[in-house]
Image (cartoon, rainbow, N blue to C red):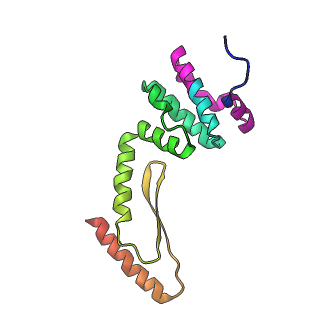
Amino acid sequence: MVNSIPGSFDLWKSEKKVKDSDLIFTRALKTQFQQDLFHRLSNTLADLKPSFTEGLQLLEMVTDLILMDYTEALFVYTEDLDTYRTYLRNLRYPMTTHHDDVLKHKFTEMPWPQGAKVKFERRGDRAGVEVRFFVSSATDITKLIAALERVQIEMGQ
């Protein structure tokens, strides 16, 4: 018999105004075991208090991992949201995660101009860096261009 007391997931769904149509990806879970596992994981995830978008992304990733026959491994690192998100992403996309780590290291080691703020990002299917500068004179721009040319040479190697 199903417990009539609302679980964390039900409360999260209500609070975030999640509709059943938002969870259409769960229709792929065909067996009772898969559905029970999803229910347990959704309550665990709701306890981490993700935003609406973040929660749906993680629930879809959890669904994919269940369909890929991951089971108890999905309950590891559930203490905080950032750690759990990273862990699930590593399970779901192992090659992309490894490739991103290599790129991040490569980009971090580049000879960026002094004072540049460099941040590695993944935007959909693309990975790269966001670079921010502060320029206050034409001389700063000249120095910046020279430094970026060194980065360009380094990237070409």
Quarter in which the C terminus is drawn: bottom left
Does 109 appear above or below 20? below
Q: Is residue 30 magenta?
A: yes
Quarter in which the N terminus is drawn: top right
The residue shown at (52%, 29%) is 63
The residue shown at (43%, 27%) is 70
The residue shown at (38%, 51%) is 100
Does 78 appear above or below 135? above
Left or right of 87 in this view: 42: right
Report the predominant secondary structure element of the magenta stretch.
helix
Does 91 appear above or below 129? above
**Residue closest to the eye, 101 or 137:** 101
Left or right of 81 in this view: 93: left
The residue shown at (43%, 52%) is 126
Specify the segment rendered in magenta. Answer: 10-38
**Residue closest to the eye, 10 or 130:** 10
Left or right of 47 in this view: 133: left
Q: Is residue 92 magenta?
A: no
Picture quarter containing residue 145?
bottom left
How far from the left and from the top, in percent, is residue 11? 72, 31
How far from the left and from the top, in percent, is residue 124? 48, 48
Question: In this view, which residue lies farthest toward the front?
Answer: 79
How far from the left and from the top, in percent, is residue 17? 73, 36
Question: In this view, which residue lies farthest toward the left?
Answer: 157
How far from the left and from the top, in percent, is residue 104? 39, 57
Does 8 appear above or below 149? above
Total residue callouts:
0
